[in-house]
Amino acid sequence: MQHALTFVIATLCILAICYRLYGVFFVRKVLNADDSEITPSHILEDGKDYVPTKKWVNFGSHFAAIAAAGPLVGPVLAAQYGYLPSFLWLLIGCVVGGAVHDTVVLFASMKHRGKSLSEVAKAELGPVAGWCTGLAMLFIITITMAGLSMVVVHALERNPWGTFAVFMTIPVAIGVGLWERFTGSMRGATWVGIIVIFACVIAGPYIQESAFGEWLSFRASTVSLVLPFYAFFATALPVWMLLTPRGYLSSFMKIGVFGALVIGVVFINPEIQFPAVTQFIHGNGPVLAGPVWPFISITIACGAISGFHAFIGSGTTPKQIDKWNDILPVAFGAMLAECVVGVMALIAATALHPADYFAINATPEVFAGLGMDVVNLPQLSESIGLDLYGRTGGAVTLAVGMADIFTRIPWFSHLASYFFQFVIMFEAVFILTAVDSGTRVARYLLQDFLGDIWSPLKRTNWMPGAIGCSIVACVLWGYLLNSGDINSVWALFGVSNQLMASIGLMIGATIILRMSEKRWYVLTCLIPLSYLYVTVNYAAYWMVKNVYFNSAAKGFNIFNGTISIVMVALGLVIMVASIQRWFVLWRARGNSEPIELLS
């Protein structure tokens, strides 16, 4: 049996070495970051969006934005294949792919005055590629909302304690936002907000046993319908009232929870009960239907490489970088930190007995066909006070694994239910924060696209257009949420997310080929791009053939299959445009002239 501490020490040592060697090389040699050059935050400083910010403050805000639910859920679902494929992909994918992707996207956006990736693609690859990138971003953000929301659905179904705790974060966040808005001070509101949230978790058992608790015991179908309605109203509210204060409060929980988990692993050093690989590496698994390749790289996106990070790296962050070399800790460093989060989530899942893990993550009918007998799950269900069988989606598994580790500490042995519900709330709050901001981004993208047909929609402050596009965005991802299971929807999310990462690497390769002193530096992007592009397209083909267009499959869905085909087609157009541009740049032997948009 392996022990968790071995993986923690190996991860920290490997990532620290890679940061010091490969990270410094990539930023200073490949990208040739020069602090004597003025950054967009200084050129366009307006005190609102373009604000020069200290690098460690930038690191914190960027890390909080990129490390949402993906690194928590993806490794848990991929544990089906065993601990070794997930652990290797997290480390290799992060260093070779994710850290490079995040850094080069941030660099490219800064070279274009902090523009979005679609605008960068338009400038670097042409208008057709730019339009396809924007459309792909709209598809991807919509699918992301459905994939993340499905995790919340299975965490809150038949769980009145968790539902109450998560619901109460809404008025708490609104109260914190109003307090800061009218007093100008966040310190007092922060302490009050954190105390009230903890009080809601502590009050959970009393709520659960009451008539109000029975009313909050929702079925999965009910939660699936409530979430899109919630997202519409959350998107309609000003960002300072709900989105920003809840994200701010959740950052404290993120740091506290994973800091506590690291300490718990160090003290307890639990055994990894999963084998290195399981019998499901060839496919037909109860959690994920596909084989270990390509689905290990599709299921684990955030934590290894994630296209969703391109929304952040070409959004707020490039407008706040003070010096060019700050992108090393902000982009490269934050991606490595997210990898640590993914490894800790993998440890929490694989420290459970495999039979217990599959009993949680598979439907009762599917689990019955595995011929496995649960070991500790009855005792865990009793101590947590909740039926844990068949709660697919990954969130419950992570909460059970973390609660199991914490309660092995003698002082906490009787607090399993509180640890479990706190982690459930912690996960749900992060996901809902991402849903709020993601739905808002989808609304902006819709207004931008439809505004080409009817110009008033371009104005994001025009209320009819904002409300109409918000409704469309919520309906789109709400339909996806209610039309499939976690297997099919998470795979759709993974394919779209990694396609976005491929697009980011295409643009990064173009920037490097045009600006770097040595053209072979382009391999830093082409190597991960080659692997990821083939992986994404094969995964899309496999899902379309075996699931979406297969009437006998559980995830049969013509709509999802059509979306997959459209996204692959968009990726192909962008790839062709990129290759054409690379040939032009190669024949020109590079061009070190400043980019026109920044000159």
Image (spheres, rainbow, N blue to C red):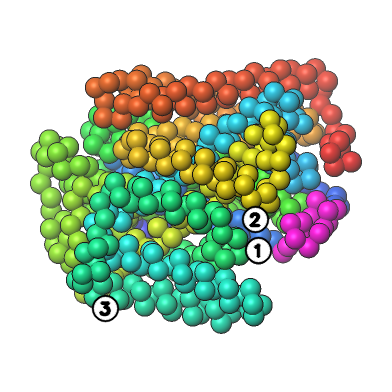
Q: Are marks 2 and 3 in contact (CB under 8 Å)?
A: no
Provide the residue designation for mark 2.
329
> Can see residue 206?
yes
Q: Are marks 1 and 2 in contact (CB under 8 Å)?
A: yes
Residue positioned 77% across, 56% down in the render: 50
Position above or below: 446 against 537: below
Describe the element under mark 3 as helix, strand or loop.
Answer: helix
Of label 2 and label 3, which has the lower sequence position? 2
Q: Dot 1 surroundings within 10 Å: few (below 14), some, or many (20 or more)?
A: few
Provide the residue designation for mark 3.
411
Q: Amino acid at mark 1?
A: Trp
Q: Please give the range of residues in magenta.
A: 39-54
Describe the element under mark 2 as helix, strand or loop.
Answer: helix
Q: Distance from label 1 to label 3 (Cα)?
A: 35 Å
Residue positioned 34% across, 20% down in the render: 549
Measured as percent of width and height from the top left, residue 259 is found at 44, 67
User: Image check: 595 left or right of 227?
Assistant: right
Q: Distance from label 1 to label 2 (Cα)?
A: 8 Å
Q: Residue furthest front?
A: 464
**228 or 99, which is in the foreground?**
228
> Can see residue 121?
no
Q: Dot 3 surroundings within 10 Å: few (below 14), some, or many (20 or more)?
A: few
**402 or 216, which is in the foreground?**
216
User: Image check: 123 left or right of 231?
Assistant: right
Q: Are marks 1 and 3 in contact (CB under 8 Å)?
A: no
Measured as percent of width and height from the top left, residue 528 is found at 56, 32
Q: Dot 2 surroundings within 10 Å: few (below 14), some, or many (20 or more)?
A: some
Q: Amino acid at mark 3?
A: Trp
Provide the residue designation for mark 1.
56
Of label 1 and label 3, which has the lower sequence position? 1
Q: Quadrant of the C terminus?
A: top right
